Amino acid sequence: MDQPKGSKLWKGTRPKYVIIGFLLVGAVIGLIAVAVSQYHPSTRNHKYGIVLDAGSSHTNMYIYKWPAEKENDTGVVQQIDVCEVEGPGISGYASDVGNAGPSLKHCMDKAKEVVPERKYRDTPVYLGATAGMRLLRMENASTAKSVLSGVEATLRSYPFNFRGARILSGEEEGAYGWITLNYLLGNLREAIWPSFLPRLFARPGTIGALDLGGASTQITFEPNQDTSGSSEYMLNFHLYGKTYSVYTHSYLCYGKDQALRLKILNNVKGSSTARIQDPCFLKGYERTMNMIDLSKNPCTARSFHPKSFSILHIEGTGDYEQCLAGIEDIFNSSGCPSSSCSFNASFMPPLSGQFGAFSAFYYVMSFLNVTEQPMDEVIKALKAFCSKSWAKVKADYPKIKEKYLSEYCFAGTYVISLLGKRYNFTKEKWSDIRFLGKVRDSDAGWTLGYMLNLTNMINAEQSFLRPLSYICHICLMVVFSVMVVLLVVVGYVIYRKPKCLKKEAI
């Protein structure tokens, strides 16, 4: 029986296809293997760090991870977990010191689950206390010391490498927040922010940081003008091979919680009765306050004058304009000893560049849904919110805690006063602010900056040794790439061989 025409040609070419196919698959596998093995990090070389942010109202625990091979002596740190400690901040345990440390156990137990057991002994743990503890230290230094001692005892009981618990200065808090923000946005190390993603900030260089807590507020940025005459406001950092000189200042007692107390104190001064009306609270809202809270608080004690009543009754009237006027009175804008000031005779150079506002700045603007709105729209939203009744607001936001919900009118108005009139973010400059909660899955705040700075003091493990030298890696990548291209071309030529080159089957 005759064979079909062309069968001899197929038999003659089949081995070629098989050989070329094997070589092509091998070349592709080799190319992928060289690329992956060269850049795949070893999990053994990851380091971990734990930072506890002991704020005035609550404590958060952050867990960070970075590769042992550091870049320019600073670890490439990323946040991998966060845990909110139940209860108040550690300063809230002033009258119950014994429970300050145990309050952290739930989150520290969680840290044992997140950090690999073999890394426990090499994982540093730091606790940084902020404005709440700064105020407690001013009020009662021995109590503040006892609270920190109790916290240290609990943290030492865990198998991690406890490095200390201390009270940060306001300037440190502001500067570390600046580091966090610029790190996450890729301004300290360009490779952090992928080039194909749009940037949140268009201008080159670093951006300023605006932080608002419960007891203090901070502003930090790189000034354009010479500030050599005000060196006490300047801090220097060396990160990723560069040195940064930034202006930073912290205003203790001007966090949103303490600022509210300052305003209430002003209301009490002009009243002879135990009942006052406050335009910063919504209509129909009522609150009582023990006068001891004003007489013993370091932020209000100096200006407090004893009254005949011990309990203060506050009734809300809900009026933005009157609230703004009352807030203006808590700032002192006179007596600037230098060329330019913010308030309370504190030097501040002219604003430069763009700014990121986080913590309570973000939470308040996010609640009002105005994080991306111009100043006029923010004020419009505030006026509308402050004019609502307390009953309506409670019905509209049933899941928000009463303490926060009742203070949003005040907090939003305070943000306008602080940023607009004290920091000089005018309507034109308001667009330079971006309100940020998280950037690249990491919280904006001082803790990551603290961790980044501390990695300069942590000895690196043995660096991860790549299987190939740089030259050898490049050569193999080129060889395998050329092989893939050549084999594809040869296979195509054989398959589509011109008729003039084919032998007629007999």
Image (cartoon, rainbow, N blue to C red):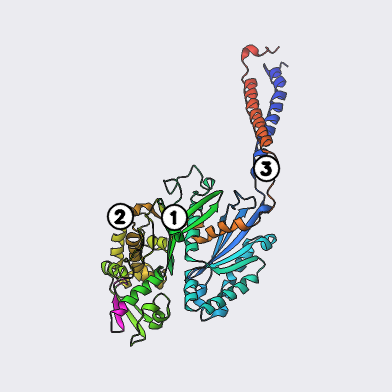
Q: Nearer the viewer, residue 305 or 486?
A: 305
Q: Which residue is rendered at x = 41% and y = 83% of the image?
A: 292
**Horizontal side of residue 151 vs 383, given as left or right:** right
Q: Nearer the viewer, residue 417 or 23?
A: 417
- Give the residues drawn in magenta, as a range: 267-282
List x then y, in percent, for residue 468.
70, 39
Q: Amino acid at mark 3?
A: Ser
Residue tagged by mark 1?
Answer: 228
Q: Earlier in the sequence, mark 2 or mark 3?
A: 3
Residue tagged by mark 2?
Answer: 427
- Disc 2 or disc 3, which is closer to the eye? 2
Asked whether the beta carbons under mark 3 and mark 1 sit within 8 Å of each other, the answer is no
> Mark 1 to mark 2: distance in Å?
30 Å
Residue 275: in magenta span: yes
Residue 178: in magenta span: no
**Quarter assignment of residue 370:** bottom left
Screen quadrant of the C terminus: top right
Q: Residues within 10 Å of mark 1 (few under 14, many from 20)?
A: few
